[in-house]
Image (cartoon, helix red, strand yellow):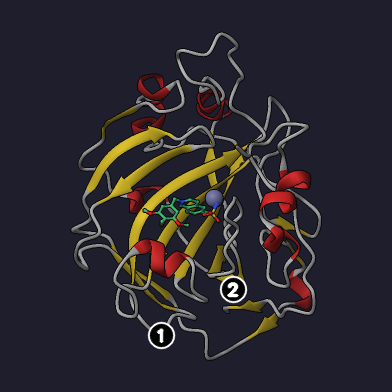
Amino acid sequence: QWGYGKDDGPSAWNTNYPVADGDRQSPIDILPHQARHDPNLGPIVLNYDRCTSINIANNGHSVVVEFEDSDDRSVIQGGPLDNPYRLKQFHFHWGGKGCHGSEHTVEGNSYASELHLVHWNAVKFKTFGEAASTSDGLAVLGIFLETGDEHRWLHMITDALYTVKFKGSVTDFKGFNPKCLLPSSLHYWTYLGSLTTPPLHESVIWIVVKEPMIVSEKQLGKFRTLVFTGEEEDERTRMENNFRPPQLLKGRTVRSSN
Ligand SMILES: COc1cc(C[n+]2ccc3cc(OS(N)(=O)=O)ccc3c2)cc(OC)c1OC
Ligand SMILES: [Zn+2]
């Protein structure tokens, strides 16, 4: 019942989700010079080598790749995290043709798109849902996408998008390791925030990587062939501009790894 349109978009979400006006909402505009460099912030460590992707789906808001998360086969740890967090899914946010579509911005500048790798603290919680509704139950790794040369591995995602054009479509998507999408440096900013879509739970430790991944305009354009609507609906609404704009910092500190 929520979306990214004029009537159901981010400015209307606080009607059904009052936490939208909360004190630790995401995304935010990141000001690098005001971020506190914290020498105690170690590197982010990704152990995705035994990760098991299951499927790729169009949930009516984005395209999502889900992972098997019944054990610690794919986890993120280190950095601001005091436990390993299990990879649950990743998805993207993007703009319209020529417009930008990232959620976090840097000094007011947005990128073409943003990848979110969603992890949950399976040490402290039994289910993703429980973690998703408890402070710091989730850790989301945000990667900016910038247009330039073609990304050598992104085609594995974009070649599958035609199979999930419509809301509610799901197809098998096995053997994909998202580590191949990451930029070379994992230097990051980190702050306490929320899910950027309803239910907007304030349960996320955000880790936003400074270096963007480079993808071609053509690859990005394939995301815009998806539609928000189901196959049975008569109108086809192109899936684009599925991003929430930056929210108030409300006194939060953003820390920077080296
Ligand atoms: C699998 O169970 C759930 C799935 C989901 C699906 N879900 C919904 C919204 C999400 C928003 C997200 O926000 S983002 N964009 O900041 O990464 C991330 C993962 C999400 C995952 C939500 C749940 O409770 C909040 C769930 O527990 C009941
Ligand atoms: Zn997201």
Tell me: residue 4, above or below residue 217.
below
Among the 4 quarters of the image, the one containing residue 106:
bottom right
Q: Which residue is mark 1?
A: 82
Task: Give SS at disc 2.
Answer: strand
Q: Which residue is mark 2?
A: 190
Q: What is the C-alpha distance between the residues marked 1 and 2?
A: 14 Å
Q: Residues within 10 Å of mark 2 (few under 14, many from 20)?
A: many
Q: Quadrant of the N terminus?
A: top right
| Residue name at image x 77 percent, y 68 percent | 31
* Residue nearest the viewer, comparing 167 with 252: 167
- Residue farthest toward the front in the current orientation of the protein: 16
Q: What amino acid does circle 2 point to?
A: Thr
- Residue farthest toward the top in the current orientation of the protein: 234
Left or right relative to 201: residue 128: left
Q: What amino acid does circle 1 point to?
A: Asp
Indicate which disc residue 156 carries: none
- Residue farthest toward the bottom in the current orientation of the protein: 40
Q: Position of residue 82 (x, y in %)?
A: 41, 85
Q: Quadrant of the C terminus?
A: bottom right
| Residue name at image x 22 percent, y 68 percent | 72
Q: Position of residue 123 (x, y in %)?
A: 30, 79
Left or right relative to 171: residue 146: right
Tell me which numbered mark, 1 or 2, is placed earlier along the sequence: 1
Task: Give SS at disc 1.
Answer: loop
| Residue name at image x 68 percent, y 36 percent | 4
